Image (cartoon, rainbow, N blue to C red):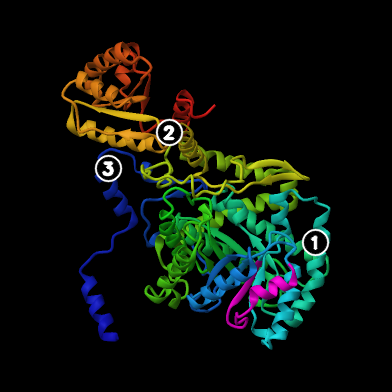
Amino acid sequence: MSKELGREEKLFKGFPSVSKNEWKDQVVKDLKGKEFEKLIWKGYENLSIDPFYAKEDLESINYLLNSDLRSNDWTINQEISAGEVTNANALAQNAVLGGANGITFVIREDESAQNISTLLNGIDLESVHIHFQSGGDSLKAITTLIDEAKNRDFDLNKIQGSIDFDPLGDLLLQGKSLKQQTDILSELSKTAPNLADHLPKFKALKIHSSHFQNSGASITQELAFTLCAAVEYIDQLSELGMDIDRICELSTFSFSVGSNYFMEIAKLRAARLLWAQIIEQYPVKNELSKLMHIEVSNSSWNKTMYDPYVNLLRGTVEAMAASLGGAHSITIKPFDSELDQADDFSLRMARNTQLILKNESYLERVSDPSAGSYYIEKLTDSIAKESLRLFKEIESTGGFLESIKSGAIQDAIEETKKQKDMNIALRKDTILGVNQYPNLQETILDKIKLDSSSSDTLAASGDIKTLTPYRGAQAFEEMRILTERHFESTAKKPKVFLLTIGNPSMRTARASFSANFFGCAGFEIINNIGFESAENGVDAAIENDSDLVVICSSDKEYPEFAPQICQQIKDRKPEMIVIVAGNPKEHIDQLKEVGVQDFIHVRSNALETLSKYQKLLGIRD
C-alpha cells in the first residue's frame, strides 16, 4: 500500500496546485468579456451556486456530519393501496418476494382490525418493516399489529415500521380545528408506554416534509418548516409529560425528494446536521436522540400523466439522491401512479430501481458516500445556513403553530409556488413531455384519473389556511386534456401548419420550436421541408384545412415573405390565424400592419398563449 501511495505522490508531484482564483481567472478569460457572475446560479432557495468549487471552499466548514456509523444500507419500501384487502395482501407478498423489505399499507381511517390482519397475512413481521398510512388517526393500527404479532409468535423486539401520525400535517392539509391538537397529541403520549413495552423499535410520530414540497415550497423552506414542526411536537409532548429522548425515539422524518439531484442530496445531509444541532439545545441523555431517522418518498410534484415512462427516469434520479443523502427507507412510486394504472409491471420497476442501485451500483456499502465532494459539502452548508435562518425566523415569531395560524408559512410557500408556476408557463423550468418535447401522438383520455387537487394552493378551511399539494405539470396537462376532449366530441383537432421558407437552417430550427410549442396543447402539427414560394406554402396550408399558420424563417427574411403570405391568406381564407416564429424586434410593427397576429419565441408565456388559442378555436370558454 505504501508503495502505491509513493507512486501516486511521484505521479502528481510534477503538477503544480491550482487555486480557485486561478481557475476563476481562466474562466473569466474564456468568457471573453462577459461577467463571471452570469454563471452563478440562483434557484428558489435564496442561494448563490457557483459554477465550480475547490478545496478552499471547505475551509470555512468546521463540522462533520453526525453519523450513526452504519453502512449506507436502506430499506426498500413499496407502497400498497389497500382497496380490496386480499388483493392488497397478494401485492404485498409479491413485493416482498420481488426484493422489498418494507411495505406501506395505505388504509382508511376506519379500517377494521380484521382487514388489517388480512393485510399482514403471510408477511414475516420480523424481517419486513411495516408502515401504515391513513391520513388520520393511525394509532389504532398499532394495537392490531401487536395482537397479530403475538398471535403469530413473532419477537416484538424485532418488529420495525411506523405509522403516519402527524396531526400538524393533517391540520395544514385539512384545516381541522386547532382545539383538537392537544387532545390528539395526548393520545400519543398515552400510547407511548404501550409501544415501549411491546414495539420498542416502532415509530409512532412522523413529521412530513412532503406537504410543503408538493405544495410548491423551495428546498430550504421545506427543510426549515419541517424542523419547526418537529420542535413544535417536542415542546407540546414534553409539556404533556413525555421524555424528550422518548419523543426522539418515536419520531421519523418523511422527506419528499425531487429530481434536483445535488440539491436533494445536500438537503438530506443538511437535515441530519441541523437536527443534531437542534437536539443539543434540549436536556437529552441519549446521544442517539441526535440522529435523525429519515424515510424518503419520491416527490409527486414533478410527476406527469403524459409521457409517464419519463417518471421512471425521475424516480431513478430521486432514489439515487435519497440513498446518497443517507435515507434509512426509500419508497419509489410506480411510474404510472398519476394515471392510476399501477400494475405488477410498474410496481416491479419501482422496486428494481432501488435493487439495481444496491446490487449493481453498491451504493449501500459506503457510509455517507457523497462526503468530500467540494460541491456537495458546500451545498450542504449553504442549505443548512439558509434553512436555519428561516427556522429561527419562524421560532422568533412564536413557533410553527403560531406561524400557520397567522398564515406566514402558507404565504411564503405561495410566493415560491407562484415563481415556479410562472417559470413552468414560460418554460424556463422544463417538465419533460409536458411543457417541453411532448409526444405528439400520445393521448391519455382513456387512462386518466381526474385530478381532485386544485391548482390553487391556499384554501379557506377550518381555523387556518390550508396547503393543497399539486403537480407542476397540472396546468399544461389540463390544457392538453381539453384538446383531447374537444377532439372526442367534435372529431376535429386544431391544425397548426408550419410554413417553412427561406434560410434552410433557420426555418428548420424555428419549425422544430413551433412544433414543440403547439404540441404542448395537443394540437396537430403539419411540418414541411420548405417551400420555394409564399404561394406554394399558402396553397398547402389551405389544402390541409389549417387553423393556424406559423411562418418559419429568419428575422431578416420575414419582411419579404410575411406580407405575401398574409395577403394571400386574407384573400382566400381570412379566418386563418398567421403567426411568426421568432421575435424580430425591428420588424414587429411592420409585420403586424400586414396581418401577422402573433409572435412565438423563447420568452413567450406558453401556457397563456396556448390557452388563448384554445379559446379562439372554441376549445375552452
User: Mark 3 or mark 1, which is nearer the start of the sequence?
Assistant: 3
CB under 8 Å between discs 2 and 3? no
Q: Which quadrant would residue 526 be assigned to in this image? A: top left
> What type is the residue that disc 1 sits on?
Ile
Q: Tell me how far mark 1 sits from mark 3, CA to CA.
A: 60 Å
Q: Which quadrant would residue 283 be assigned to in this image? A: bottom right
Q: In the depicted view, which residue is nearer to us: 314 or 369?
A: 314
Helix, strand or loop at disc 3?
helix
**Residue 193: x and y, percent?**
79, 77
Helix, strand or loop at disc 2?
loop
Looking at the image, which residue sits at the far left? Answer: 532
* Quadrant into which the N terminus falls: bottom left
Residue under label 2, please give it: 491
Between circles 2 and 3, the one closer to the viewer is: 2
Q: Tell me how far mark 2 sits from mark 1, CA to CA.
A: 55 Å
Residue under label 3, please give it: 31
> What type is the residue that disc 2 sits on?
Ala
- State which region is magenta: 112-132
Left or right position of 59 against 254: left
Residue 201 in the image: above or below residue 313: below
Residue under label 1, please give it: 184
**Residue 32: x and y, percent?**
25, 40
Residue 73 in the image: above or below residue 318: below
Q: In the depicted view, which residue is nearer to us: 265 or 31?
A: 265
Is 466 included in the stretch rendered in magenta?
Answer: no
Residue at the image position 38 percent from the left and 62 percent from the top:
55
> What type is the residue that disc 3 sits on?
Leu
**Residue 345: x and y, percent?**
45, 65
* Quadrant into which the C terminus falls: top right
| Crowd tier of the residue under label 2, counting other residues whose Cα lies within 10 Å: few below 14, some 14–19, many 20 or above | few
User: Mark 1 or mark 2, which is nearer the start of the sequence?
Assistant: 1
